[in-house]
Image (spheres, rainbow, N blue to C red):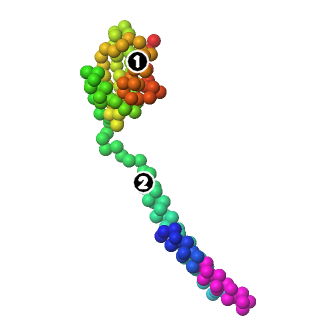
Amino acid sequence: MTDLTEKKSLQKALLEAEKLLETSESRQLRTFDEILQVLDLVIGVLKDHQRELDRLIKTVSASHESPVDPQGPPVMTRCKRWEEFKALASGAEMVSFLFKETEKAFEADALKEGSVLAYSGEIPRDANLLKVWLSRELGVPEEKVFDLTTG
């Protein structure tokens, strides 16, 4: 039922109940049958509302169930060239990097659309500048770029 239909059916039942009560009051006589008739009308409307609420609850519950991920584990793509990584990781949800100064090695991982993109190669030496640089290069906010360098 729509809200308008529900309101109209409730109003109709209440008007009928009110008429029965007015008739009874004017006669100063309320029979048991008249009272039962009023209660039946109200109970009928309430049952209709309960059925509608149950249906709505089922609909809402079904739409909020956790979807099953049919893809399984995330796909990992390793890039050997920075330009490939940059193109694929641009706009990533999150980026982490590791700079090994002694080995002059740089590693970056990006999470984008459920896939992990990985790059390993040479890059500038200053790890602090790497965060700013990665943020700008990949269009990812700095607070979403994590330095995993130890030491």
Q: Is residue 89 left or right of residue 8?
A: left
Q: Nearer the viewer, residue 133 or 146?
A: 133
Using the numbered discs, state the Cα–Cα distance from disc 1 to disc 2 in whole angstroms: 43 Å
Q: Position of residue 151 (x, y in %)?
A: 45, 12
Q: Position of residue 13 (x, y in %)?
A: 58, 79
Q: Nearer the viewer, residue 86 or 37?
A: 86
Q: Position of residue 31 (x, y in %)?
A: 67, 88
In percent of the image, x 48 and y 70: which residue is there? Answer: 1
* Quadrant housing residue 85: top left
Of callouts 1 and 2, the N-terminal one: 2
- Mark 2 secondary-structure assignment: helix
Q: Is residue 90 above or below residue 81?
A: below
Label for residue 63?
Answer: 2
Q: Is residue 131 above or below residue 69?
A: above
Q: Main secondary structure of the magenta part?
A: helix
Q: Residues within 10 Å of mark 1 (few under 14, many from 20)?
A: many
In percent of the image, x 47 and y 27: which residue is there? Answer: 143
- Residues in magenta, as a range: 13-29
Q: Which residue is mark 1?
A: 130
Q: Nearer the viewer, residue 99 or 89?
A: 89
In percent of the image, x 54 and y 76: which residue is there? Answer: 9
Q: Nearer the viewer, residue 68 or 78?
A: 78
Q: Residues within 10 Å of mark 2 (few under 14, many from 20)?
A: few
In percent of the image, x 36 and y 27: which residue is there? Answer: 138
Can see residue 38?
no
Q: Is residue 137 above or below residue 56?
A: above
Q: How many marks?
A: 2
* Quadrant housing residue 44: bottom right
